[in-house]
Image (cartoon, helix red, strand yellow):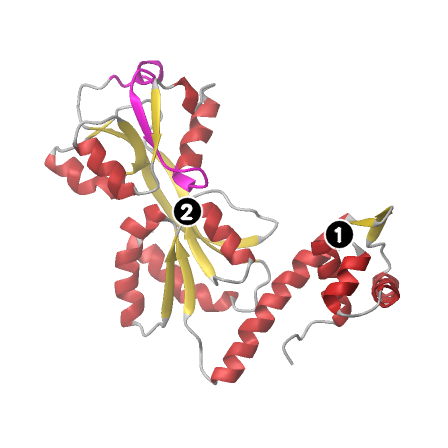
Amino acid sequence: MENLLDHRLTTLMVVAQTGSLTAAAQQLFITQPAVSQQLASLEADLGVPLLVHHGRRVKLTAAATELVAYAQRLGQDNQAVLKRLRLAQTPPLRLGATRSLGAFLLPQLLVKVIAAGYQLEVTIENTAVLSRQLLAGQLDAALIEGNYSRQDFAAAPLGSAPFIGVAAQAEVPATLPALFDQLLIVREVGSGTREILTTWLAAHNAQLSDFRQTLALSSPTAIIELLKQGVGISFMYRALVANELARGDLFELPLAGFPLEHPLNLIYLKESSFAAEFGPLVATAREVLGN
C-alpha cells in the first residue's frame, strides 16, 4: 500500500493537476463517470462545492484548492511514514539551506548536530528553489532568510543577522543616489538576499535598474572575491565578510538605516506530523546565532 490517503482526495489532486475530468480518468485508469462519482461523494461528505465547470475544463473552487494543498502535505507525510516503517529506523533529515546561510550558519550548525548524532542530507540552493523542493516533498525543512509562503509553510524563528552594504574602497559615497553610479553586484533571481535588497530599494522609491550597471551572481564567494578586486559594491550579511572587514580588505557602507536586521527562519510544511522533531535543530541554530 503506497498511498494512505482517501482515494477521493487522490482523484481531486489529479483533477487539479490536469484540469480535466477526462485526463484525470486516463491518468488514474478509471472511467470519467467514476471520477465524477468520487468527486460528487467527496462534495457531499464535505458539504462544499469543489469544481466549477467551463466546457470540457474544470476549475477548482477556493475550498478545493485549500483541500488539495492539505492533501499534498498529508501525502508527503505518508511517504515519510512509509519510509520509516520499511527502514525500521529514522531516515536522514533532509535539510535545505540558502547559499548565504550555507556559508556562515550551516558549517557551525553541522558541527553541533553531527556531534548530536543526526543523520543528515543537506541541499544548498536559493530560497525559491528550496521552497519548491519542500512542496515537492524533496526536503523536510529549510534554513532561509527570504520571505516564504505562509499559506504553505510554518516557520520557527531562529533570530536575525545584520545585512549591510559592502565595497572595497572606504571612500565610496554612502548615499543611495550617489551609489547609482556604481556597479552593483547582486544575487540571482529567487535569492532571499536579492529580495531583501529589492524590497529596501522599493521602500526608497528605487530599483535595480537605477544603478549604472548590475551583475547577477549565484555565488556569495564569487561576489566577495570580485569586491576584493575592487569591482563594484554589493549587499549581504555581515557574517559573510566578517574576516574581510576585520582585515580592511572590504569596508561597510555607512548607509542611513543600515545595517538591516532581517529574520532567519527554519521553514517546513504546515501541519507536518514531524514538526516537533525540528525543535533540537532550531535550538542549536539559535545557539550558533547567539539568539
User: In screen coordinates, is 122 left or right of 23?
Assistant: left
Tag 2 secondary structure: loop
**Circle 1 — which element?**
loop
The residue under label 1 is 19
Q: How many tags in the picture?
A: 2
Measured as percent of width and height from the top left, residue 6 is found at 74, 71
- Residue 15 lies in the magenta stretch: no
Determine which quarter of the picture holds residue 220: top left
- The circle drawn on residue 241 is none
Instruction: Look at 41% across and 57% down and name the residue there.
Output: 96
Question: At 34% across and 61% down in the image, what residue appears?
Answer: 284
Q: What residue did someone put label 2 on?
A: 126
Residue drawn 30% across the image and 30% down it = 234
Q: Which residues are magenta?
A: 173-193
Is residue 268 something that shows in the picture?
no
User: Foreground: 241 or 257?
Assistant: 241
Q: Dividing the picture into quarters, in which one does residue 271 lie?
A: bottom right
Nearest to the observer: residue 162 or residue 111: 111
Q: Where 233 falls versus 63 (above or below)?
A: above
